[in-house]
């Protein structure tokens, strides 16, 4: 790390703090030549991972879409935001670790499974949009299937 004051590459870290909010590390450094202090931040580089959409095109994976979709379906007091965010992170790890691009359909199905175990009403709300129910009969069938579990 070069000193921004004298361009010397000899520096030492005098303080280090991890920031959980944005997964960064803040380091206070001191130049060994001029003695001045400065701050650097270290962040994990975000990976550009893609998923396969219904039409076959590739789209950059965005965990915020999962969070937003789930939040539309749930009552906030039923499933804490932390649980929703943890699920989105789990899906992100799955997408990143997969050797082949994962389909949005697979992500949607895993989201439905997760919701089914957390809140059945939210599951029906999410499924009505995700599965594109054409009428009340399809919704009734889905509810019957849920009741049989």
Image (tube, grey):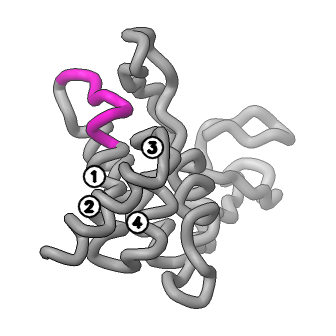
**Secondary structure beneath disc 3?**
loop
In the rendered image, residue 35, in percent from the top left (x then y), is placed at: 77, 58
Residue at x 41% of width, y 23% of height: 50
Counting every numbered tag in the picture gives 4
Q: CA distance from mark 3 to mark 4?
A: 13 Å
**Secondary structure beneath disc 1?**
helix
**Tag 1 residue:** 110
Q: CA distance from mark 3 to mark 2?
A: 17 Å
Circle nearer the viewer, 4 or 2: 4
Residue 25 in view = no
Query: N-terminal of the two: label 3 or label 4?
Result: 4
In the rendered image, residue 134, in percent from the top left (x then y), is placed at: 47, 39
**Tag 2 residue:** 113
In the rendered image, residue 143, in percent from the top left (x then y), is placed at: 32, 67
The answer to whether mark 3 and mark 2 are in CB contact below 8 A is: no
Residue 53 falls within the magenta-colored stretch: no
**Tag 4 residue:** 123
134 vs 69: above or below: above
Q: CA distance from mark 3 to mark 1?
A: 18 Å
The answer to whether mark 2 and mark 1 are in CB contact below 8 A is: yes
Circle nearer the viewer, 3 or 1: 3
Residue 49 shown left or right of residue 70 in the figure: left
* Magenta part of the chain: 100-107
Query: N-terminal of the two: label 3 or label 1?
Result: 1
Circle nearer the viewer, 1 or 4: 4
């Amino acid at each position: 790390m070069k000193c921004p004051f004298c361009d010397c590459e000899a520096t030492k870290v005098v303080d280090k703090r991890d920031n959980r909010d944005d997964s960064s590390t803040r380091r206070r450094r001191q130049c060994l030549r001029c003695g001045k202090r400065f701050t650097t931040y270290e962040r994990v580089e975000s990976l550009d991972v893609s998923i396969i959409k219904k039409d076959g095109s590739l789209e950059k994976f965005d965990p915020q879409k999962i969070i937003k979709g789930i939040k539309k379906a749930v009552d906030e007091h039923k499933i804490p935001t932390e649980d929703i965010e943890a699920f989105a992170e789990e899906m992100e790890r799955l997408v990143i670790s997969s050797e082949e691009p994962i389909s949005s359909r697979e992500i949607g199905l895993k989201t439905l499974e997760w919701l089914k175990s957390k809140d059945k009403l939210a599951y029906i709300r999410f499924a009505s949009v995700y599965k594109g129910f054409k009428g009340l009969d399809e919704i009734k069938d889905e509810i019957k299937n849920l009741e049989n579990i």
